[in-house]
Amino acid sequence: METREIRLKRLRMRAWHRGIKEMDLILGGWADAHLAGADDATLDAFEAVLAEADQDLYRWVTGQAEAPAALRPFLGRLSEGIGGAA
């Protein structure tokens, strides 16, 4: 079974090593600012977001396209960090 520490490291690595730099900055920045204090439900939501394609995520986070309903709550939190500190 994966420990919390290993899960956090894995999620941080996935967040910072995306296909496009913009998503590295958005997801990695959020991970650095929030992962350590996140509860399991938040980690699950973040992991679901990480499973999506970068091009889709970028359009959803920037409001260019509507995100799937299941991802909207977390993407709203993620979008709040774009304009300033994550």
Image: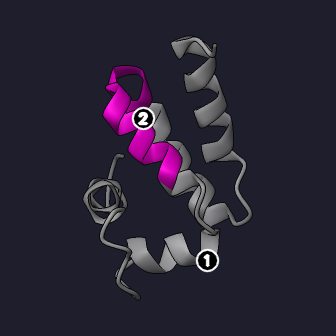
In terms of sequence position, does the residue under pointer 1 or pointer 2 come before the other? 2
The alpha-carbon separation of the residues under discs 1 and 2 comes to: 21 Å
Q: Which residue is mark 2?
A: 43
Quarter occupied by residue 7: top right
Quarter occupied by residue 46: top left
Query: Considering only vertical position in the picture, is 82 above or below 36?
Result: below
**Residue type at numbered disc 2:** Leu
Query: Considering only vertical position in the picture, is 41 above or below 81?
Result: above
Span colored in magenta = 34-48
Helix, strand or loop for the magenta stretch, by majority: helix
Which residue is drawn at the image coordinates 29% and 65% (left, top)? 72
Q: Nearer the viewer, residue 9 or 32?
A: 9
Figure colour scheme:
one colour
Is residue 39 magenta-colored? yes
Q: Is residue 86 left or right of residue 22?
A: left
Q: Is residue 83 left or right of residue 46?
A: left
Badge 1: how crowded within 10 Å, few (<14), some, or many (20+)?
few
Image quarter hosting the N terminus: top right
Q: Position of residue 42 (x, y in %)?
A: 34, 37
Badge 2: how crowded within 10 Å, few (<14), some, or many (20+)?
many
Q: Position of residue 48 (x, y in %)?
A: 49, 51
Which residue is drawn at the image coordinates 60% and 34% (left, top)? 12
Number of numbered callouts drawn = 2
Q: Nearer the viewer, mark 1 or mark 2?
A: 2
Q: Position of residue 40 (x, y in %)?
A: 36, 27
Query: Considering only vertical position in the picture, is 43 above or below 39?
Result: below
Q: Which residue is mark 1?
A: 55
